[in-house]
Structure formats: C-alpha cells, structure tokens
Image: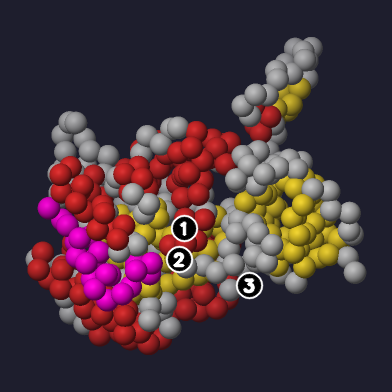
C-alpha cells in the first residue's frame, strides 16, 4: 500500500537535513533519509525548510478586515481606533463578521498558519462576535484550529453586563477566559477582575489569556496578580499574559523580582511586536520607548514566549497580511534578538512556542504527530524570517491544502539574461558564474 504523502529531501527547523517525511491517515509515520516506498502524492522539498504550521497565539477575528467600515482611521491612533470599534459594533451583523473572519482564515491558511487563538469581544448583549466566531470555528475546523477567548474588551466591571455576558459566552462554547485588568476603573478593580476570572477558569477547567498591562504605565503591575492567582489556584501552564508592554517601562529592580514569579507560575508571555511598536510610547517625546515587553529576559528565565499578530486591517491597525514571519521579523528587530541563536528562536516564537501557549496536542515534526506542516522557499528558520519566505506548500492531515509558486524574477540585462531566486542568497552561497 502506498503512503498518502511523502515530502522528499527537506530540512527541519532544528537543522536535521536530507530527510524524507512520510504520512498516512493524517499522521507522520516515518522521517528518514531516502524513503523508498511509493506515495499517492510526492513533493520534492529541494532541501528547503519543512516546519510545523505557523501559529498565531493572539488575534481579533471579530474585527479583522473591517478597515474602512464605517470609515477610515484617518489619524492612525489607538484612540480613533477605539472610537471606530464603538461605531462599528452596533451596526455590524453576525453574517458580516462570519464572512470577514472566513476570508481572513482562508488568507491565514494560504500563509501557512495552522492555528489561531482569537479573542472575541463579549461586551454586547447580543454576543454577535461570539455567535459568528463559533460558526467560523466549526466551518474552518478541517483546515485550521481556532481557539476562542471570551474577552471583556470594555472591562469586566467597567462595562455593565460584561460579567454575565462573559459567562454566557463560555456556556455557548468559547474555549478560554480573557480579561483586561489595566482597563478597569481602578488598580483594585483590575486585580479583583483577575481573581474572579481565574476562579472561573479553575472551576470550569479552562485556560486563561488576558490582555495584561497593555500600557506604558510602569505601575501597571497586574501581571504580578496574574502570576499569584495562577499559582494559588493551581493553573500553572494554562495561563498566558498578552502584551505585557508596561514591563518595558518598569523599574529594573522590581522586574528582577517579577520575572521569577512569572516563571514559577509557568505563565506564557505573548507580546505582539507589530502592534506594540506601533501603539506604545505615544505619549513620549524623545527618547521614545519601544513598548515591547522584555523578551530576552523572559526567555532567559525559561518562560514560554510566543509572538502574536493581534490585528490585521481593523480599526486599530490598517496594515498586516496574516504573515507570522512579518511578526517574527519585527519581534527580532525590536527585541534586538540578533545572535544566530536568538534569530532562530524568533521562528520558534511563531511556531512551537505559540503552539505550547495554546496547548495544542500532537503538534510538531515527529513520528506520530499530526501531518500538518509547511514547506518554505528558504533553507532554514533565519532565512525564512529574512525573506518572509514563500509558503510553497501547506499540508494539513497529510493533504496539500495550499500551494504558492516559487518566487523568482527574470532579468533582462544586456547580453546576459538571468533569473533570481531569493532563496539562492543563503549564507555561504557561491556567486554565480557569469
Ligand atoms: Fe489584542
């Protein structure tokens, strides 16, 4: 019996190379050099990078692709974005949200994303976003793992009815408990919201992912409470703090106490480099803060750090294209993660670290894992980030679900017609014979 699929001659993110990967019944069943068996589909990997799918651990599917509805964010500021979302929420329909989110999921799949954790605003009594994204989760399930977070965007206590709506959203099937402690009216309310939400997660056996301290205020220290409640309630390994931008501005001595507490609670940290660099430091003159959390220090302490994209073409961010390599590229630059080891780690931040934050099972390139992976037009993770490389093939359950043609450019220079393939310019390549 032939295998369902063999991808021949690939390089893995950990550097193993010249491997063939064979798949059967949606699982990886063999990974070795030169597999001789037949397969229904064979792909020549040409030595390129084969990676488990990209994972976006922080997104807002209920707002994505709404740019221009009901009008543009002309100033490009967070404040106008918040105002715009307030205008759009009452007029958008469930059908409209479904349509936009499905369109974004298609784009994500084409860009090699295999899983998304999306926050969904639960601050409207109709729960339109929740209704829509539950439908989307069902429709995309064969191609994309979609995890939903009940997000009280206007504040759990600050907005009337949020607490009840959040519980209703969980009852309807939303997967994860969200929060936004720094947006509550007082520090005390913020801390209290964390206690209430973590207790709710503990009672229901759910994970937690809060927008936490997304501010330049160095005194916004809700992450400390999140670490405390995680440990008190035995939620270790199931809780993530998203953004954590205030850590950029905190006193160093305080941070030296905080990071070990976060490690002890086994929190995941999810900065969103594109959005953090765009929105933070806006009240500064010069020097201007970058606003991204302390990635190097968090990872040095053994904390799981994953990069999220947060927004694409929505009221808060007009750009974006479902490209987790854009996200890794920005995270690498803003975090000054330029050693060879750190650059390669940035690829992990949008693949295996993000999968760990989501608690994805059977993710990875090992025998027995789901046959979900992406073939890039690049030969290693650093090159994939440098080029924001083409996703030549996206495979899900052992089947090709998206293909992109090789990127190359024909040159017409006097007397020497030629073509350029961006993946040829890898370290150590020899200049072509002219
Ligand atoms: Fe967010």
The colour scheme of the drawn protein is secondary structure
Looking at marks 2 and 3 on the same chain, the residue that comes earlier in the sequence is marked by 3
* Residue at 40 percent of width and 42 percent of height: 331
Which corner quadrant of the image does residue 270 belong to?
Answer: bottom left
Q: Which residue is mark 3?
A: 142
Circle 2/circle 1 CB separation < 8 Å: yes
> Taking the image as drawn, is residue 260 in sight?
yes
Return the residue nearer the eye: 353 or 105: 353
Q: Give the mark toward the camera: 1 or 3.
A: 1
- Label 3 sits on a secondary structure element that is loop
Q: Is residue 53 left or right of residue 149?
A: right
Q: Residues within 10 Å of mark 3 (few under 14, many from 20)?
A: few
Query: Which labelled disc corresponds to residue 56?
Result: none
Residue 115: % across, % down: 53, 63
* Stretch in magenta: 219-239
* Residue at 20 percent of width and 60 percent of height: 224
Q: Which residue is mark 2?
A: 358
In the rendered view, would you say 305 is above or below 420? below
* Residue at 32 percent of width and 79 percent of height: 201
Q: Answer yes or no: disc 3 within 8 Å of ligand 1.
A: no
Looking at marks 1 and 3 on the same chain, the residue that comes earlier in the sequence is marked by 3
């Amino acid at each position: 019996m032939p295998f369902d699929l063999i991808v021949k001659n690939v390089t893995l993110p950990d550097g193993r190379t010249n491997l063939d990967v064979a798949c059967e019944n949606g699982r990886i069943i063999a990974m070795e050099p030169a597999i001789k068996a037949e397969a229904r589909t064979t792909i020549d990997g040409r030595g390129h990078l084969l990676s488990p799918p990209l994972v976006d651990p922080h997104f807002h599917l209920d707002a994505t692709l709404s740019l221009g509805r009901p009008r543009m964010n002309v100033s490009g500021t967070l404040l106008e974005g918040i105002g715009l979302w307030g205008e759009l929420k009452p007029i958008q329909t469930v059908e409209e949200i479904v349509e936009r989110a499905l369109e974004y999921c298609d784009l994500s799949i084409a860009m090699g994303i295999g899983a998304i954790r999306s926050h969904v605003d639960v601050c409207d009594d109709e729960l339109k976003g929740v209704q829509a994204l539950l439908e989307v989760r069902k429709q995309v399930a064969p191609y994309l793992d979609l995890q939903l977070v009940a997000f009280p965007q206007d504040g759990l206590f600050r907005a009337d009815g949020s607490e009840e709506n959040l519980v209703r959203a969980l009852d309807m099937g939303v997967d994860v408990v969200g929060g936004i402690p720094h947006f509550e009216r007082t520090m005390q309310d913020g801390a209290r919201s964390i206690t209430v939400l973590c207790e709710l997660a503990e009672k229901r056996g759910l994970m937690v992912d809060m927008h936490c301290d997304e501010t330049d205020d160095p005194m916004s220290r809700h992450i400390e409470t999140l670490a405390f409640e995680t440990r008190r309630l035995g939620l270790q390994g199931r809780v993530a703090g998203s953004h954590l931008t205030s850590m950029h501005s905190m006193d160093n001595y305080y941070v030296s106490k905080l990071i070990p507490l976060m490690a002890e609670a086994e929190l995941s940290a999810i900065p969103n480099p594109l959005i953090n660099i765009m929105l933070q430091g806006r009240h500064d003159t010069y020097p201007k803060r970058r606003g991204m959390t302390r990635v190097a220090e968090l990872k040095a302490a053994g904390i799981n750090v994953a990069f999220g994209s947060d927004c694409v073409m929505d009221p808060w961010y007009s750009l974006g294209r479902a490209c987790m390599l854009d996200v890794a590229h920005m995270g690498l630059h803003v975090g000054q993660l330029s050693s060879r080891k750190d650059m390669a780690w940035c690829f992990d931040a949008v693949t295996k670290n993000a999968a760990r934050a989501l608690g994805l099972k059977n993710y990875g390139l090992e025998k027995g894992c789901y046959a979900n992976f992406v073939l890039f037009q690049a030969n290693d993770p650093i090159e994939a980030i440098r080029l924001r490389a083409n996703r030549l093939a996206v495979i899900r359950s052992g089947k090709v679900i998206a293909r992109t043609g090789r990127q190359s450019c024909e040159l017409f220079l006097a007397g020497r017609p030629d073509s350029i393939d961006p993946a040829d310019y890898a370290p150590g390549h020899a200049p072509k014979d002219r």
